[in-house]
Image (cartoon, helix red, strand yellow):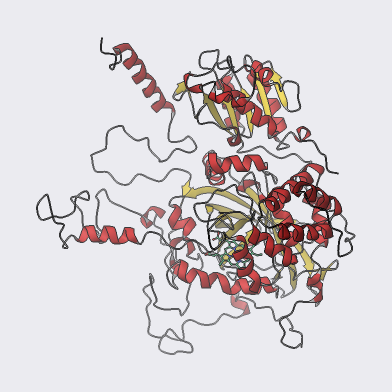
Amino acid sequence: MDSSKPAKAVRDAVEAAAEKVADVLTPDLPGAPGSAAPTVDEPTAPQDPLPPKKEQGAPQTRTPTGARTGAPPTVYGQQGAYLTTAQGARLRDTDHSLKAGPRGPVLLQDHHLREKITHFDHERIPERVVHARGAGAHGVFTGYGTADGVTKAAFLGKGRETPVFVRFSTVLGSRGSADTVRDTRGFATKFYTDEGTFDLVANNIPVFFIQDAIKFPDVIHAGKPHPDREIPQAQSAHDTFWDFVSLHTEAQHHTMWNMSDRGIPRSYRMMEGFGVHTYRLVNAAGETALVKFHWKPKLGVHSLTWEEAQLLGGVDPDFHRRDLYDAIESGAFPEWELCLQVFPDTPEETFAGIDLLDPTKIVPEELAAVQPVGRLVLNRTPTNFFAEVEQVAFHVGHLPPGIDVTNDPLLQGRLFSYVDTQLTRLGGPNFAQIPVNRPHAPVNDMLRDGLHQHAVHAGVAPYRPNSLDGGNPSPAGDDENAFVDVPVTVAEAPKVRANPVSFDDHFSQARLFWLSMSPVEREHIVRAYTFELGKCFHQAIRERQLRCLANIDPVLCAQVAAGLGLPAPEPTVPLADVAPSPALSQLGREWPADGRVVGIVVDPDADLDGVPEVRRAVLGGGMVPLLIAPHGGVVGDLPVQRTFATARSVEFDALLLAGAPAPAPDALPARDDKAGAADVATVDPRVLLLVEEVWRHAKAVGAWGAGATVLERAGVTGTPGVVTAGSGAEAFGAVRRLMTAHRVWERFPASIR
Ligand code: HEM
C-alpha cells in the first residue's frame, strides 16, 4: 500500500471533522474576520460587496458641511459587483500588465497599472508624532442632565444622545509597536454634538510631565528612542528619558503614575480617563465654573502584571486592540461615566490650596466629589481602520458653546499644536472633511480651496462683510447660541518667561500618590523604578533619580536603591505632609467581570461532562470562553479556539480545567519540560505551564473531575483562589466571584508597608 496516500476511512474522517469545524466556526464568533464564511473554492459569480459585520459602525454619512445625506455608511467605500478604475470604468483584468506580447515589455499606455501602483505608492501617511499606536471604536454618549447648572452645552442635557468616536493609544511607540508596554494611554473622544464637535483629548493619567507646552518637544525627544541607534522602542526604560525627568523634576508626579500599575492597563475598557487640565464651563445664565473631566470605567481600573505585559509583547502585541474589538463583538460593550469635579471660578484659580492651572497636580476626589454627568457606551468597531482610526483628528480647541479653556500654559500650547501637526499628517487644511472628522452641526465657514477640497462651495463672497451673497454667513449672537469666549480678566503684569511660584512644588503630590497605594501596589512601583533605572547605562542618571525619590519617600528610595545596589541619598527638601487619597488605589472593591476571557482546558479523550454548560454560562455572563485542546478543530460539538501550542496564560483572566490531557504528540516533553512540574509524563507540560503562570499572576483557577489532578500535579491545590469543585457550574461560579476582585491579591506577598 502507498503510505503517502491516507486510507479512505482516514480521509473520510478528516473531511467529516473539517465540515464540522466549518459549521461551528461561524462569523458571529468574536474575532471572525468577515461577515460571511469563506468558501474553499474562489467565488466566481459577480456579487455586490458583502455587508460589514453586524457590530461594525462607520462615520455617519454627512456632507463636508455637516448635513445628513441619509445614505448608508457603505457609500463611503465601494459599490457594485464589478472591479473598476478610480473613475468607475469596469476592468477586465487586474492580474496582468498591458504588454507588447506575453513577454513584454510593459507599455506606458497601461493607465490601470499606473493608477494602481501610484495609489499604492502613497498608501502610507506619516504616523502621529506621538500617540501613533492606537485603536478606536464608535459609540453613543447619553447626558444625565446633571451638568445643566454649570454648562449650557446641550449634549449634556438629560437623555440627549450624541454619537461619539473614541481613540485609545500609547504615547511613545511607533504605529506597529506592542500594546502592553509601560506608558501613558491616550483616551481621546470626539462628540459629534449638534452645536459643533467637542473633542475631549484625555489620558489615563490625570497629570502631565510638564507644566508648559514649550517643554513638550523636550519630554518627547527624551522618551522616544535614542536618535543614533533608534532603540529602545515604545518604552521609557532608557537613559534619555530618566536623564530628562530627573533634571526637570516637575515630571516626577507623572513618572510615578507611569511606574505604577496604571502604566500597564489590563484593557482600554478598564482605564480611567482624565482631561488633565482645568476647563471653564459657562451656564445659560452666563455663570462660570472651573472643572476637571474624568471618565470612570464601569469595569473598574485594572492592570496587567509586569510579567504578563512583557509576555504579551511577544505572544499578542495587539492585546488591547483585540480585547476592545472582541469585547464589542461579544456584546460586552465598554462603558464609562463622564464625571466632573467642579470648583468655584475664583480670581486665584485655586482649590484647597491646589493651583488649578498646574497640570502636574490633581485635586483628590476626597476633597472635590467626582460627579457623573453622562454615560458613554462603545458599541461599534470600525469598518475600516485607516479611514477611521488613522484619519481621525482630535483637537483640544474643538469646543461647543458652554465649554471654554483656561490659561493653563500646557493647554494653551496644545491649542496650537494639534491643527498644526494634522496639516502635514493628513495632507492639507481640509482634514475636517474626512468622513470620521465631519461635524454633525451645520458648517458655514469661509475657508476655501486647498488640497483635497471635498465641498463644492457656492456663492461669490467668502468674506465678511459682503452684500453679494446677501450678507451670508451672519455672526451669531447670544440668542443664537454663539460660542462663548469667557471674558476672563488678565492681570496687569510684565511680559515674562516664568512660572507662578505655586508651580515650584514638584514632589508633594508624587508623595501623596505613593502614600495612597496598598502594599502590593507599592511593591509594583518599586520594581518598576528598579527595572527602568536598571536598564539605564549611566550610574549618574540612576543616582540623580534616587535623589528625586528621596524627596518623595524614604522607603521607596531605599527599596529602589537596594535593587540598584546604590546607597539611598537623603532628601534635599522636607517631606511633604500630605493626606493619602484612598480613591487612587485600584484594590479593595468588586467590579463586574463583563468581557473577561476564560480559558477552558479540555481533554478530547475524556468525559466532557459540564463543558458545554460552562461555555454557555461564560457566554451568558457576558464573557468570552476560549476552549483549549491538544489539537484544533472541534471537541464534541464545540469549537477549539486555542491549542496547547497556541495558548498562553496571559490571554486569559481565569482558567478552568475540565480534564487532565496527556501529553499531545507535539508536546516534546523533553523540551517542554519548562513547566517544571514533576509529572510531565501524564499531563501535557503546556497545560502545567498554563496553571503555573496563571497562579504566578494571581488569577483564579477552577477545576472539576479529572481537571483537579492537574492542580495537584502543579502543586497549587488548596492555595488562595484555586477552586476544586464537584461540577463545572460550581467551579465557574466560584471563579467568577473571584474575578470580581480582578486578582487573588492574597497570593502576592505584601512586603512593603
Ligand atoms: C495633558 C496633556 C496632554 C494630553 C492629555 C494629551 C493627549 C493626547 C492624545 C490622547 C493624543 C492622541 C490623539 C489621537 O488618538 O489621535 C494626542 C496626540 C497628540 N498630542 Fe497630545 N496630549 C497632551 C499634551 C500635549 C502637548 C503639550 C502637546 C504639544 C504642545 C501635544 C501634542 C500632540 C500631538 C502633536 C499629537 C498628535 C495629534 C495627531 O497627529 O492627530 N500634546 N495627545
Quadrant of the rendered structure where residue 117 is? bottom left
Instruction: Classify residue 268 as left or right of residue 5.
Output: right
Q: Say which residue appears at 68% left-offset and 41% top-offset.
A: 305
- Residue 712 sits above or below residue 341 on the image: above
Q: How many labels does the image show?
A: 0
Q: Say which residue appears at 45% left-offset and 22% top-offset.
A: 634
**Quadrant in the picture for the N terminus:** top left
User: Horizontal and vertical percent for residue 435?
Assistant: 44, 61
Q: Can residue 296 be seen in this view?
A: no
Between 109 and 267, the one nearer to me in the picture = 109
Quadrant of the rendered structure where residue 624 is? top right
User: Horizontal and vertical percent for residue 598?
Assistant: 60, 31
Instruction: Classify residue 121 as left or right of residue 552.
Output: left
Tell me the quadrant of ligand 1: bottom right
Instruction: Classify residue 575 as left or right of residue 496.
Output: right
Between 666 and 203, the one nearer to me in the picture = 666
**Quadrant in the picture for the C terminus:** top right
- Residue 333 sits above or below residue 136 on the image: above
- Residue 467 sits above or below residue 306 on the image: below
Q: Can residue 436 be seen in this view?
A: yes
Q: Say which residue appears at 73% left-offset and 84% top-offset.
A: 490
Between 700 and 525, the one nearer to me in the picture = 525
